[in-house]
Image: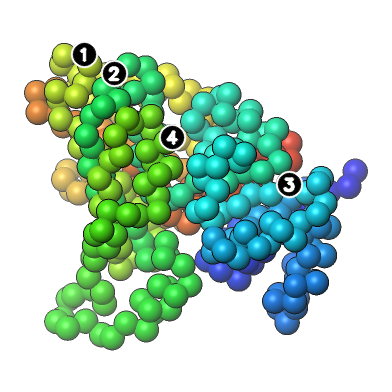
Amino acid sequence: MKKPTIYIDGQEGTTGLRIREMLAPREDVEVLLIPAEQRKDPQIRAEFLNRADLCVLCLPDDAAAQALTMIENRATKVIDTSTARRIDPEWVYGLPEISNEHKEQIRQARRVANCGCYPVSVILALRPLIEQGLLSPGAPLTINAVSGYSGGGRQMVEDYAAAPPARREGDARKALCLYGLDGGHKHVPEIWKFSLCEKSPIFMPSVDHSFCGMVVSTPVPAEFFVEPGVGPHRVYELWREYYRDSPLMKLVDPADNGLREGKFLDLDALSYGNFIELSVWGDAERGLVLVGRLDNLGKGASGNAVQCLNLMLGFDETTGLC
């Protein structure tokens, strides 16, 4: 039986490289690698884009749009990891854990827009609570997020690698930095659409000196829960039922204190993996904090793309990921 062929357009970027690493040991697919000296030749690129059974576009928005115009083979399936098509109704949003029905849409899709890294935690934490009527969709929410610097792509990786020595002994080479302070971060539209929130949340991202890893926290005041007395166990039990068919989901039981030294939740606990972890903290009186941890290049980008690829090509969704 012929192996399905996969071409990664943008195979040298951070997302493309991680996908290549995940696919390299597999014997059930054939990865088409364009020679380095031909990567920018439009005719060669077009040939590879149209030869493949499935193309993964690991490109900036404009370059991904250009690549799409080069695909004339209607049988070629596409996963686009850029931002531009994530809320496009003609594309299926690539986050399988949204629901079993959504997973089936990905399985049948020809065009999938891979999710952004930050939205994974927010959508998967909030959507079940709103959908099941536990959390008011009108709650005004603020999301605090920290990512490893690989999330900024090759240029940021190079900037951090070239960073001068720390100013003081014991300091990190670069301290944690806030960005997106104008409120117009590119991930907000997909968070707003797929979390089912009625109001666009305030989103406050930051970048850490760690290469990869991510922690995203969403505080929810008690008054925005529809039921009185909603505590961590109520949320955990709802999540557990909702995600019973999600093999890459890890849920932290509130009875298990998974904090380092009993008080620290480290950013990099799921680095270099493809799982998403949800935990809930706080109490029914003051409110709760919903927290997601993942690898920004794993479940937040490359790992999620491979999960969607598996579904689209008829493999088990976890193939090559666990």
Q: Looking at the picture, does residue 96 appear above or below residue 151?
A: above
Circle 4 is placed at which residue position? 194
Query: Relative to 244, is 163 above or below?
Result: below
Question: Residue 79: percent from the left, percent from the top?
Answer: 64, 49
Which residue does the image show at 69% across and 49% down from the upper left? Answer: 78
For the residue marked with disc 1, what is the amino acid?
Glu
Rounded to the nearest whole Å, what is the CA distance between mark 1 and mark 2?
Answer: 6 Å
Amino acid type at mark 4: Phe
In the rendered image, which residue does mark 2 sit on?
134
- In the rendered image, which quarter contains the N terminus? top right
- If you read the primary sequence from the N terminus, does the residue marked by circle 2 or circle 4 appear first? 2
In the image, residue 77 lies at what x, y percent? 73, 46
Horizontal arrangement in the rendering, residue 37 relative to residue 199 (left or right): right
The percent position of residue 69, horizontal first and vertical second, equals: 71, 58
Around disc 4, counting alpha carbons within 10 Å, would you say few (fewer than 14), some (14 to 19), or many (20 or more)? many
Q: Quickly name the residue at label 1.
A: 227
State whether residue 191 is above or below residue 65. Answer: above
Q: Which mark is residue 102?
A: none
Disc 1 and disc 2 in contact, CB within 8 angstroms: yes
* Residue type highlighted by circle 2: Leu
